[in-house]
Amino acid sequence: MFKTNVPILVVAAFATTLFFISGCKNEKKMTPPENSYKIGFLHHSTGNVIWSGKPTGIKKITSIFNKNEAVPEWFSDYNKTNSKNYFITEQNFPKAKPYGWNNYPYDYYNIWVKNAGESPYMEEPTLEMLTKDYNMIVFKHCFPVGNILESTDSADLDSDKKTLQNYKLQYLALKEKLLSFPETKFLVWTAASLVESQTTPGETARTREFVDWVVNEWDAEGDNIYLWDFYSLETEGGQYLKPEYAVGENDSHPNGTFANKVAPLFCQRIVDVIETNGQKTGLTGEPK
């Protein structure tokens, strides 16, 4: 009887653990220290890879029990060494339900500009809400942002169709909104890239054009909006997520090797934006 019950108990305990971990994913369980500088990181799976320093997924199930996460560990060490009080937390944005697992230019525009206000939109916090909780807000897109369609119609600000013209209109509306919160700093990741098998030459060219436009035209000196050039780190001058940085040849999630390489650069960029308005690091977070 004992030999029969032990595996059942183990499985039950493991399932319960997974339930609580997954169920609490979107809850803020930590309380920031008094007078801390609060940073909110809004992301999906690619962002979580960088946050944790390891890939997600069931094949990495043992990492669930490893509490060390690259980004919060980096900040903990930095705070101790430099007598700082930076507090960073993360959350999925937007959640899978009820809004849907989409975080493209349209979705940030839809939640933060079109449906702005003091109340959540489809259970997602607006900027009016988030800026009350955070001194800095970091946000990004997942890699399907690079599946940019060739435009056959005129640009439409209110369209969720992924075209370069729509992206630009939505980013211009987002910029105006972000600038209306001058006391909050915003750090925006450039678009995540895809492995070669998951995109087309046309999509790749349009993604490159979008990234170049964001870096060279949309971004401006002297305001409260800053960039972290994730695209350049993933591609290293190429057009695709480098194979050695990908989970697999058909999977555009970055792997743990890449995550551990760039997580410190992400953290350095955040700190430099806070302390010097980004004067001591380049867009990738590397020292100037």
Image: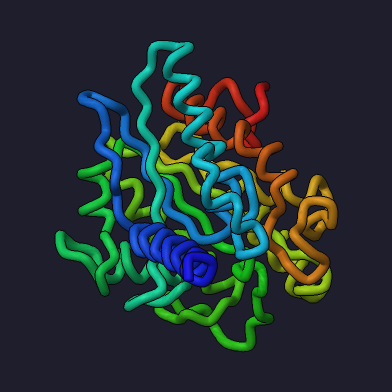
Residue in the image at 42% along x and 47% along y: 41
- Across the whole image, how many numbered discs are drawn on residues? 0
Does residue 84 sit above or below 45 in this rendering? above
The x, y position of residue 231, in whole percent, is 68, 51
- Find the residue positioned furthest to the front: 1
Does residue 103 sit above or below 71 in this rendering? below
Does residue 244 sit above or below 198 in this rendering? above
Q: Is residue 114 left or right of residue 140?
A: left
Residue in the image at 40% along x and 79% along y: 158
Q: Is residue 217 left or right of residue 212?
A: left
Write down the quadrant of residue 40 in the picture: top left
| Residue 104 shows in this picture | no
Color theme of the render = rainbow
The x, y position of residue 92, in whole percent, is 41, 59
The x, y position of residue 123, in whole percent, is 25, 69
Write down the quadrant of residue 152 in the picture: bottom right
Residue in the image at 66% along x and 80% along y: 149
| 80 or 226: nearer the viewer | 80
Q: Is residue 9 left or right of residue 264?
A: left
Residue in the image at 29% along x and 46% along y: 29
Does residue 195 sit above or below 88 in this rendering? below
State which quarter of the image contains the C terminus.
top right
Write down the quadrant of residue 100 in the picture: bottom left
The x, y position of residue 225, in whole percent, is 44, 42
- Find the residue positioned furthest to the left: 118
Q: Is residue 161 left or right of residue 87?
A: right
| Residue 121 shows in this picture | yes
